[in-house]
């Protein structure tokens, strides 16, 4: 691609991105942008080779340090979303990406995309963890059985998205009669776990995330 065309298309892309994000590309224009700074601080902690040797979750001071960096970045994103919601409530709309995502979450005809139900699940899980483990206690195998709601969340995730969707094929060594069907010997068969765990015949709302 000739250089002048590359530059021209690059400028066009920047203009499109500015319109989509409803603001200039601050991350590129200002390397010390508050979002960039918070992101880099969080990444700096995670990329520190020291933490690959000593797991941070076993050291309360380091754990709080890492979580504080992540919380700061998360809070910035939360504030950005709140400002966008205020703009929408005031009738200010320009059709950017975040606006479409917010509208999709609030669409009553689209229950599969919501930031409310999962936050409620997250809140309940966090309350259980703090109640049983506190903020500085290192988890142990003995605590696992007490974290009932957290275990329900894990199992529900595995039901919806099984790490092994289907078991290895097996070949029947003899004829098998199942209900009114005859499966002859030599037929390859496999257990389709994803289909079983998402079947409306077995689950009332198979596509919904319901830890309970």
Image (cartoon, rainbow, N blue to C red):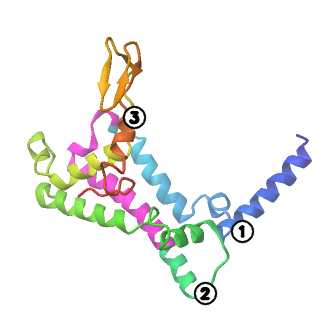
Picture quadrant of residue 126 = bottom left
- 77 left or right, relative to 209: right
Picture quadrant of residue 51 = top left
Which residue in the rendered view is the most extreme toward the front?
180
- 135 left or right, relative to 26: left
Residue 207 within the magenta-colored segment of the rendering: no
Q: Residues within 10 Å of mark 3 (few under 14, many from 20)?
A: some
Between the C-alphas of marks 3 and 2, the distance is: 46 Å
Q: Residues within 10 Å of mark 2 (few under 14, many from 20)?
A: few
Between the C-alphas of marks 1 and 3, the distance is: 41 Å
Which residue in the rendered view is the most extreme toward the bottom?
90
Query: For numbered disc 3, what is the local secondary structure?
Result: loop
Mark sitting earlier along the chain (2/1): 1
- 172 left or right, relative to 211: right
Give the labeled residue for mark 3: 165
Residue segment shown in magenta: 52-81
Give the answer, above or below, for where 15 lies relative to 86: above
Q: Position of residue 211 (x, y in %)?
A: 26, 56
Query: For numbered disc 1, what is the local secondary structure?
Result: helix
Q: Which mark is residue 91?
A: 2
Please tell me whether mark 2 or mark 1 is closer to you in this view.
2
Please tell me whether mark 3 or mark 2 is closer to you in this view.
3
Q: Position of residue 100 (x, y in %)?
A: 59, 69
Residue 59 within the magenta-colored segment of the rendering: yes
Mark sitting earlier along the chain (3/2): 2
Give the labeled residue for mark 1: 19
Between the C-alphas of marks 2 and 1, the distance is: 18 Å
């Amino acid at each position: 691609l000739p250089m002048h065309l590359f530059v021209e298309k690059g400028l066009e892309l920047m203009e499109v991105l500015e319109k989509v994000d409803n603001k200039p590309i601050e991350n590129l224009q200002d390397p010390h942008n508050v979002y960039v700074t918070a992101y880099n601080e969080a990444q700096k902690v995670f990329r520190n080779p020291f933490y690959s040797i000593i797991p941070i979750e076993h050291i309360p001071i380091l754990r709080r340090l890492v979580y504080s960096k992540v919380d700061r970045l998360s809070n910035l994103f939360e504030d950005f979303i709140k400002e966008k919601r205020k703009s929408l409530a005031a009738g200010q709309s320009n059709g950017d990406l975040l606006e479409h995502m917010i509208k999709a979450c609030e669409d009553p005809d689209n229950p599969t995309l919501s930031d409310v139900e999962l936050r409620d699940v997250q809140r309940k899980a966090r309350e259980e963890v703090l109640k049983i483990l506190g903020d500085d206690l290192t988890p142990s195998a003995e605590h696992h059985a007490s974290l009932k709601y957290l275990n329900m969340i894990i199992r529900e995730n595995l039901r919806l998205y099984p790490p092994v969707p289907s078991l290895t094929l097996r070949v029947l060594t003899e004829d098998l009669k199942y209900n009114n069907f005859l499966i002859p010997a030599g037929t390859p068969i496999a257990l389709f776990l994803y289909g079983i765990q998402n079947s409306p015949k077995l689950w009332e709302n198979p596509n919904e995330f319901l830890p309970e």
